[in-house]
Image (cartoon, grey):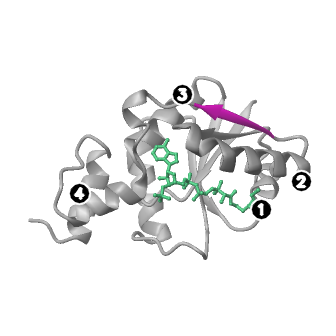
Amino acid sequence: MKIAIYPGSFDPITNGHLDILERAITLFDKVVITIARNSSKNPLFTEEERLQLIREAVKKHKQVEVDSFEGLLVDYARKKNATAVVRGLRAISDFEYEMQMALMNRKLNPDVQTVFLMPNERYTYLNSSIVREISRLGGDVNDFVPKVVKQALDKKFKVK
Ligand code: COA
C-alpha cells in the first residue's frame, strides 16, 4: 500500500489544496492530509476548526485520512508508514523554499520521497493569507474555497 503525507497549515484549506490532494489520490492508495503544528504562525482557525473544515471538504474521498502532528515531518511520515510527501508547486517562487525542505527531509530520512504536483493554473496565485484577507475585508471568496470554509470565514468575520 503506497501512502503519502500532504502536510501544511491549511488556515484554511482552499480549492488549491484540494486540487493537489485530488491529484495525489490518483497516485497513492492513501493520502494523509495533516496539519503541522507551527508555533511561529498565528492561525485564524484553531487546529480543531481546521481539522473539521478539512474533514468536511474531503469527506467524499475514502482514501484520505485527516490528521495533525507535531515535530519533524519525516518522523511523522515514518510513523504513518508513508513513502512520500506531497507538496504543491504553484509558481517558480515556491520552488526555492520547497527544494530546501525536500532536500533537508531527504537528508533526515532518505526513505521518504517528496513529490511535487502542480495545481490547475487558476490556483497559482492563491494562498490562505490572501483568502483570509479578502474575506476579512468583505470580498467574495466563493471561487477559492469549499462552501464549508466560506461559511466558517463568514462566521469568523461576522458576515450576515
Ligand atoms: N493552493 C493554495 N495555497 C497553497 C497551496 C495550494 N496548492 N500550497 C500551499 N499554499 C499556501 C498555503 O495556503 C500557505 O499560505 P499562507 O502562508 O498564506 O497561509 C502557504 O502556501 C504555505 O504553505 P503550507 O503548505 O501551509 O506550508 P507551510 O510553509 O505552512 O508548512 C510544512 C510547511 C508543514 C511542510 C513544514 O513547515 C514542515 O514540514 N513542518 C514540520 C517540521 C519539520 O519537519 N521541519 C523541517 C522541514 S525541512
The rendered magenta stretch, by its main secondary structure, is classed as: strand
Residue 105, x across and y down, in percent: 81, 50
Circle 4 sits on which residue?
151
Q: Which secondary structure lies at badge 1? A: loop
Circle 1 sits on which residue?
72
Instruction: Identify the amino acid type marked 1.
Output: Leu
- CA–CA distance between discs 1 and 2? 9 Å
Say whether marks 2 and 3 touch (CB < 8 Å). no
Circle 3 sits on which residue?
23
Q: Is the residue marked 1 within 8 Å of ligand 1, measured from its CB?
A: yes
- CA–CA distance between discs 1 and 3? 25 Å
Say whether marks 1 and 2 touch (CB < 8 Å). yes
Is 123 situated above or below 9?
A: above
Q: Which mark is residue 108?
A: 2
Instruction: Identify the amino acid type marked 2.
Output: Leu
Residue 129, x across and y down, in percent: 40, 59
Instruction: Identify the amino acid type marked 4.
Output: Gln
Q: Which secondary structure lies at badge 3? A: helix
